[in-house]
Amino acid sequence: MELLSNQILAGIATGAIYACMALALVMIYQAIGQLNFAQGEMAMFSTFMAWQMIHWGAPYWAAFVLTLMLSFAGGVVIERLLFRPLAKAPILTNLAGFLALFAIINSVAGLIWDFTIKPFPSPFGSSPFLGSRLVSTHQAGMIGVILLVLAVLFVFLRFTRMGLAMRAAAAQPESARLVGIDTNRMIALGWGMAAAVGAVAGMLIAPVVFLDPNMMGGVLIYGFAAAVLGGLSSPPGAVVGGFLVGIIENLVGTYVSGVGNELKLPIALALIVIVLVVKPSGLFGRQEIKRV
Amino acid sequence: MTAMLDVSDLRAWYGQAQALRGLGFRLAEGGVTALLGANGAGKTTVLRAICNMVRTAGTIAFEGRPLTGLSTASIVRLGIAHVPQGRGTFTTMTVEENLQLGAISRSDRRGIISDTERMYSHFPVLRERRRQQAGTLSGGEQQMLAVARALMLRPRLLLLDEPSFGLAPLVVRDVFGILGKINREDKVTILVVEQNAQLALELAEAAYVIETGRIVMSGSAADIANNEDVRKSYLGY
């Protein structure tokens, strides 16, 4: 029993990271209808910025908050410079844009900070959490911080006028313009928020996977799995999907014989395929109906 | 007297296809004007052109101010509310959220609250359904919501595209009755595009008839209603 509850808790911890990545993906998907393949690299770059600040002597939380702000600004700049001009371009052109962004960020990070693996500090330490061998204080803190971030986002989107405008712009852009919403501004805001949410995920997973330019590759795939599982049209779905993927991954890795750490990633991919076949709009997504 | 809306030599294109071929008209402040015409004549395009939702040339001036180069959102913020075909309802949001979105460009909290109440008294059924998803409303209720949402902007000019579309005749009477009341009480100038010419001419004081992107007739609603050609083509008697 203790093994089960610990495994679930550990699953929730990594699931929280996947939830963040999935949410970041969904925010941009909702705004522009495209999957941001560079989301993981953006998060990785943010994490390097935080590492640099801490390396220069900044206190952890100051670096954390400053990184969030810089990431937000970075997200807005990327939208303005790269994806606004591509807004009316075909989907493949956009795809090329995302892959270019991926490659650029990855190599720039490698150029500045090189490709050697670096440790990243955790503000929560890594002692056993409440005497559990499987869950550390860092994982517990990670869950706490991410739940806080998710709660803030939820309140913003649900209960503020700006959040309402953002949801309206994502759901029906033409109608949104007809009530006076500047949809371009909302898209930029979505990019900024997605970049900041990704940065949270990056900074919190870095103490576990260590910091290097390729650190987010696996995490992004889990994020995709989570977003597809929850439904690309549903931010809360993406979050639930993230936690589910985290828990499933851990439980299957523990209880299904023959599935070790090496086989965990294929499970995420299998999950994507199964969801796409059985319920293409995801657990919480809405089927998009187009009138012709 | 300067017109509230002054349109001249308006041309519009969808890709290569030209939809408007140089038309002009003026809207008197406080009036109701109807745009009539057959399917594909360009009625909807005129409304879309006013809000810069289609590629245009020519001039459109609102209260003396040219709208050229302004984005849809900033044109709306000048006080031009547009109820498009299909009503522009935010179907996944509640009735109340739709009304809030109508007032999203305003910052007077108190005014928004009292206007919301006013809309609920214009349209009592919306109050009953305030927490319901807008997509689950009936066609008539959605049209009422669309009009209410547009009025939440406190517009000076209200553009309506086929408000009778898909509604039962009794519901249409309701909606048009309320439109007349809004025009009289709130002094909102209305430009209405309608297939149902008879209905539109009852509400309007002035009317324009469009054919293949040009205005072919204009005059008071009574004159147009009595015109032999119009009766044959659009009124069917």
Image (tube, coloured by chain):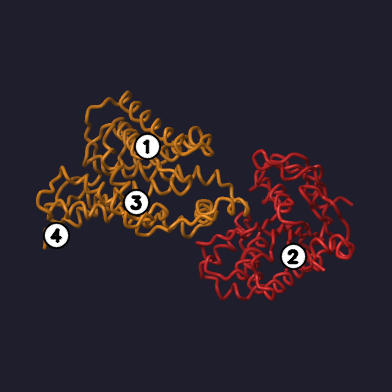
Chain colours: A orange, B red
Cβ–Cβ below 8 Å for labels 4 and 2? no
Farthest left residue in view: A257
- Name which residue type carries label 1: Ala
Residue A4 shows which numbered tag? Answer: 4
Label 4 to label 1: alpha-carbon separation:
35 Å
Q: Which residue is mark 3?
A: A228
Residue at x 53%, y 51% (from the top left corner): A169
Label 2 to label 3: alpha-carbon separation:
46 Å
Looking at the picture, do discs 2 and 1 lie on one chain?
Answer: no
Residue A38 shows which numbered tag? Answer: 1
- Relative to A115, residue A67 above or below: below
Q: Quick one: label 2, few (<14), some, or many (20+) residues within 10 Å?
A: some
Q: Quick one: label 3, few (<14), some, or many (20+) residues within 10 Å?
A: many
Mark 4: secondary structure: helix
- The residue lying toward the viewer, choosing from B17 and A116, is B17
> Is A140 on the left or on the right of B106, as rendered?
left
What subunit carries mark 1? A
Residue at x 48%, y 33% (from the top left corner): A82
Q: Which mark sits nearer the N-terminus, 4 or 1?
A: 4
What subunit carries mark 4? A
Q: Given this view, does label 4 or label 1 mark the residue nearer the observer? A: 1
Cβ–Cβ below 8 Å for labels 2 and 3? no
x and y percentages locating residue A153 in the rendered image: 41, 53
Mark 1: secondary structure: loop
Q: Which mark sits nearer the N-terminus, 3 or 1?
A: 1
Q: Which residue is mark 2?
A: B196
> Is B9 on the left or on the right of A121, as rendered?
right
- Name which residue type carries label 3: Val
- Relative to A3, residue A107 above or below: above
Cβ–Cβ below 8 Å for labels 3 and 4? no
